Amino acid sequence: MNNIFDKIHSDHSEFNFDKLDDEIIVNNPLELFKKWYEESITNNCFEANAMILSTISDVIFPSTRVVYLKDLSDEGFVFYTNYNSRKGKDIEVHPLVSCLFYWNTLFRQIHIQGVAEKISDEQSDAYFKSRPRESQLGAWASRQSQEISGRSEIERALKEIKKRFEDIEVPRPPFWGGYLIRPLNIEFWQGRESRLHDRICFERKNLSSDVWRMFRINP
């Protein structure tokens, strides 16, 4: 065990893939996000659409998990989940959220802070129809984030759901759908040599503003 921690202590890798110049001109940070996302796909970053989502509730601790970006619009970032899950209940009470994309192959991170809101039923319906049937059934079977007695309970629930929707189209559960994260702050982090990373930030005063202020912060 000590050897493992010795390796951690001696890990001082350098970051030298790219840079973010002061002269970067972007009126809307979502355009830069699209560029970086395309480069993450081109460079075969594993699960490039995985994002770490943090929510808060009335308890002491924030809650963090990995979800998947499923759509990007001029308004923001879309992911799907069970509305009765821990994240769903958190958002219902406190819609301010934080999410992070990390692409280690490119030494890049994008940190987003914004407001989450449910998308339309029509948009959620359209995405649900595109999911594999087994995933559709799983959405019905799982009471996400609720305590269960064991694995057999969820397997039994899945059997019952398969029987319920046998030979018919699986509708979207009323408790399942999408959220749109409308960004207020976006930070682009590019790893650089000597740990002097580039950190370019964009912020706007409110969700109705189209004006973004761009600035650099210390690494």
Image (cartoon, rainbow, N blue to C red):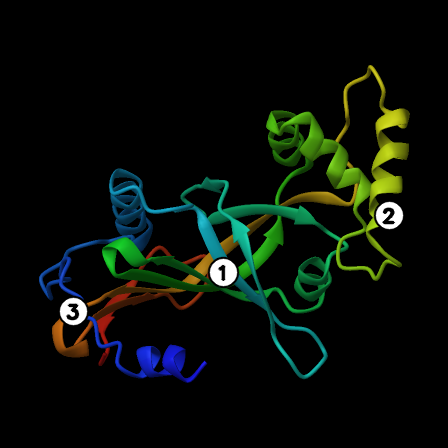
Q: Residue at x 77, y 55 (%)?
A: 84
* Callout 3 crowding tier (Cα within 10 Å): few <14, some 14–19, many ≥20: some
Q: Where does label 2 land, which residue?
A: 152
Q: Residue at x 61, y 34 (%)?
A: 123
Q: Residue at x 24, y 78 (%)?
A: 217
Q: Amino acid at mark 2?
A: Ser
Q: Earlier in the sequence, mark 3 or mark 2?
A: 2
Give the secondary structure at mark 2: helix
Q: Residue at x 81, y 59 (%)?
A: 146
The quadrant in which residue 24 appears is bottom left
| Relative depth, front residue between 60 and 16 | 16
- From this viewpoint, which residue is outermost toward the top? 167
Q: Amino acid at mark 1?
A: Ile
Give the secondary structure at mark 3: loop
In this rendering, the label closer to the viewer, 3 or 2: 2
| Relative depth, front residue between 81 and 8 | 8
Q: Earlier in the sequence, mark 1 or mark 3?
A: 1
| Image quadrant in which the N terminus is located | bottom left
Q: Where does label 1 land, which residue?
A: 52
Spot occupied by residue 189 in the image (x, y as percentages of width and height): 27, 66
Q: Where does label 3 land, which residue?
A: 192
